Amino acid sequence: MDNMNQKVSSFNGEPHSYTRFNLTQNMEGDNSQVEMKLSSDMDEEVGGNGTAEHLNHNSNRKPYVAQKLGRTPKNLCFMAAATLLIFIIGYLIGYLVHRKKDIAQPTCTNSVIAPAPPFVDERGSAPVLDWDDVKKLLNEKLSTSNFETVFSEFSSSNHQAGSPGDEDLANKVHRKFKEYGMKTWTDEHFVKVQVLQGTNKVTFKGQMMETQGFLSYSASGPVAGGVLYAYFGREGDFSDLRNKNINMSGRVVLVKAGMISFAEKVANAAKVNASAVLIYADPDDYSIGETTALYGHVSVDKPLLDSLQYGVVAFIVCKFNILKILGDYHIIHHTALALCYIHYTNIISKWMQLQGPEAPSRWGSLSRLGSEDDVITVEVNNVLVERKINNVFGVIKGYVDADRYVVIGAQRDAWGAGFAKSTVGTSILMELARSISQMVENDGFKPRRSIVFASWSGGEYGSIGATEWLEGYLSSLSMKAFSYIDLDGAVTGRRAFKVSASPLMYTLIDGALNEVTAPNTAATLFAQYGKNNWESFLLENMKQESAAYPFLAFSGIPSLSFRFSNGNLDYQYFGTNLDTREKLNIATSNEVPQLAQTAAQFAGQIALRLVHDYILRLDVQKYDKIIRTKVAQINRKVADVQRLQPQLWPKALTMQWLMSAYGSYSRASRNLESDKKNSDLEDVEMCRIINDRIMMVERNLLSPYVSPYESPFRHIFLGSGSHTVAALLDHLDALKTQNPEADANQFRNQFALATWTLQGCANSLAGNIWSLDNEI
């Protein structure tokens, strides 16, 4: 052994030494030996006898021998008996433990039998409450009297984004979240916004008019051009002007407020190469008074810009005298797109004298469209400043899938008092946070997944706070956040109820409409407003100014927004200093607390359903109908183009592949529903796999073939840009009419990329790659 130690020492001194264990069995007897040999790299290179000598070194010493039991009948019987004994002991221990767990002896205290413990989910989500119990608890926690208190606490006359008033409200929200026992945190962002420096001016026929309101992210500086009346500034309105062969390039466009956002009006004007846009509130639509200023923003897609990117744009303004905050519309060279709000009284006195073609009779009080000789000068004096904004968060963590969460959010800032715009939504957010926290702490509710409560700033500038958060956490949010519920503007009236959402959430909405009672009645929201078909009467397209829109179209997170209203028009006091509690009382017949309570119940039930069930209640088959409808529309338009303009249609292009992609999605959605019905709800991993497949649907409808910077809203059905199915249909119309802007090759690319996006979504929904049976 001393000799062996010397050998080990000598080999340890080699720089490339290693240890090798060689196990050999001596088959010549009942015993076998284990021989340990140490060798170096140098020894490996020795051949012939040298190797033999190395393998048999120290052969004169007795090797280390391990004894093994002989395989005699006696030993075999002993081993069998020992194995049987161990099995019997293990069985008895398991039986006793199981019996003790299932049959507990009741204990008696003062002659009262202790109640049986509640059912405990083996994964730790105990106790499991029935859904009816969860709904009842939520309704008990929410009351109109509590809302009156919260309204008073979170009302503010001055809380513009980044102002001291906004920061005070943020601190209040943060303190409340901590009082409710939630994990809280804040996100701080430095963003670029525009403010008015002095006044904006409009000069027409020798008369100069100053305006008090302003629209952020407009280009600055003077612009002149012939005035052109364009009604509400919608795409259809500009199409009507185009059909009249009216030159719109370089014109100063006059449009009425309403119907679509200010930003969309500007984007539509940019498409026709207008030089400026003037917006006014017509008394036929607004009763806000002739001297009330309007405030807002005109950014489309580009609230997604961070402060550095805004700095680049500001430089471009200095160099080219333009500002690019127009989403898909690239920088408009040689022109400055300015925008200004003007008073109606200033229009009536002078602009009734407009020349040019007659306006359509349905376009209101202005009888003429204006001519290029009616020159107007617009001067905008907005300046870009940096503001610090804070988003405030609180979370109720789930007990099973804590890393999966639904987000409930509300805007905190406003131009003025902003009672309907922000105070009501913030109050609903706080009451839901308080109620659900108490359900968890006091009533035994343990959600399977987490609930994140978010108070956003920068909402009036285009949901900057929400979109900055989405940008900063995009890669993780798209994998973990499975829904967003927006509370902004939830109460603006009482006669109607409107909802906009991802199709994945339609089944959830239907359930909540049939379970939540309308204010001051015994009828449900469905019975009160739905008219037997809520999708036809209550559903509306999601607006781009909604904070829910970037969640859905930019991040691919199923989202929902809703509102009580008095009709299809927006609340007329948004963006003014008249958005007060008094005005909202008039609009709701003094039922603001009751409507807020109902709104909280509606949003709360949807959120709780998403964190209560084993399988996410997101219906992937709802997209099946939408895709089928769109494919049928494309097919009809393709047939028209092939019939009317066969020379424009690429011969190699066929509808087969789009139809095949739809078929793949349809099969995958049906198979997923089958998997959900046949799944073992006690299998945590299986439920998680199914839920992940559901969550990927919305995200995989974002086109991977366009840049998120150039086209942030990449959703092919609900987004905006040339990659969308809507753009595909418009391009087919252009091909059909031989529009000079139509391009058959560009359409072929659009068609192919949309098809592959849909096919990729279907493949992902199908699950594992060996589950696919598509012909590619």
Image: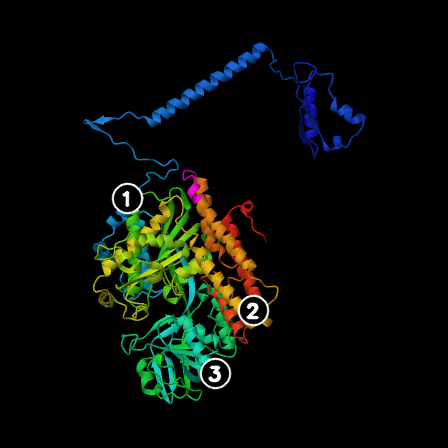
Mark 1 and mark 3: span between their CA atoms? 64 Å
Please indicate, yes or no, whether residue 711 appears anywhere in the rendered image.
Answer: no
Residue 286 in percent (x, y) is at 29, 74
Left or right of 490, for residue 762: right
Q: Which quadrant holds the N terminus?
A: top right
Crowding at mark 2 (Cα within 10 Å: few <14, some 14-19, many 20+): some
The residue where tag 1 is placed is: 133
Task: Check disc 1: other Cα within 10 Å, few if <14, some if 14-19, many if 20+.
Answer: few
Q: Are marks 2 and 3 in contact (CB under 8 Å)?
A: no
Between 200 and 401, the one lying in front of the other is 401
- Mark 2 vs mark 1, CA separation in Å: 59 Å
What range of the chain is rendered magenta?
675-683
Task: Write down the residue under mark 3.
Answer: 247
Label 3, residues with CA under 10 Å away: few <14, some 14-19, many ≥20: some
* Residue found at x 37% / y 47%: 611
Q: Residue at x 80, y 25 (%)?
A: 49
Mark earlier in primary sequence (2, 1)? 1
Kindly report the distance in space between the C-alpha atoms of the residues bearing marks 2 and 3: 32 Å
Task: Tell me how many marks there are.
Answer: 3
Q: Name which residue type carries label 2.
A: Gln
